[in-house]
Image: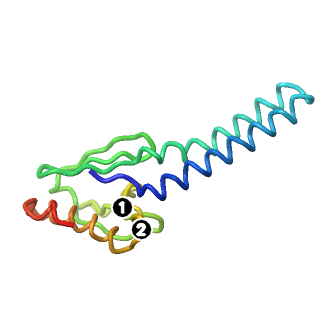
Amino acid sequence: MFQSSPLARAGVQLVALLLGLVVALKAMAVLDHGLGVLTAFLAVAAALAAPLLLDLWAVVRADREGIRWRNRGLAHRLDWNEVAGFERGPTSMVLRRVDGRLVPLRALGLRYFGSKRLAAERVAVLERLRRGRPDHAGQR
């Protein structure tokens, strides 16, 4: 099982905390102008915060049968015969499906604990499982 780097998760939590603080301060400021403005502001803030908060629970799990991942609260599963491989995406590693579609794996960032090498090792574990050699999957 792979999850986002603790450093990345801490960064997301910090951004969410700062956003919450801004929302709270703004809510106090707009109370004088009525609840309509407050409701609109809170709706926009929730829309901005939701993707950040949901990415905290991004996860990738793999076994001999296939791979399962959760991005932004939605869980998916593919058998290994439907996976062509893995490659670098714009913000995270992506799974390339046999039909050519790319699926971002948000839990597999381009760095893990700030290290590109550790991130590449995580993808190598998945590649070994995909190729049917799980006996090496536990190596780091």
Q: Secondary structure at mark 2?
A: loop
Residue 25 location in percent, x, y?
80, 39
> How was the colour assigned to the protein in this rendering?
rainbow
Residue 6, placed above or below residue 39: below
Residue at the limit of the structure toward the bottom, as seen here:
117
In the rendered structure, which disc, 2 or 1, sits on the residue that comes first in sequence?
Answer: 1
The residue sitting at 20% across, 65% down in the picture is 127
- The mark tally for this picture is 2
**x%, y% of residue 31?**
87, 29
Position of residue 98 relative to residue 45, above or below, is: below
Contact, CB < 8 Å: mark 2 with mark 1? no
Q: Residue at x 41, y 58 (%)?
A: 5
Amino acid type of disc 2?
Arg
Label 2, label 1: how many angstroms apart (C-alpha)? 19 Å
Residue depicted at 38% across the width and 70% down the height: 88
Q: Which mark is residue 30?
A: none
Q: Position of residue 42 (x, y in %)?
A: 72, 34
Tell me the number on the disc at residue 111.
2
Neighbor class of circle 1 (other Cα within 10 Å; few <14, some 14-19, many 20+) is some
Q: Position of residue 50 (x, y in %)?
A: 57, 41
- Nearer to us of marks 2 and 1 is 2
Q: Nearer the viewer, residue 105 or 19?
A: 19
Q: Residues within 10 Å of mark 2 (few under 14, many from 20)?
A: some
Extreme-right residue of the structure: 32
Left or right: where does residue 126 sit relative to residue 71? left
Type of residue at label 1? Leu
User: Viewed as shown, does residue 108 lie left or right of 10?
Assistant: left
Q: Which residue is mark 1?
A: 102
Asked which secondary structure carries label 1, the reply is: strand
The quadrant in which the C terminus is found is bottom left
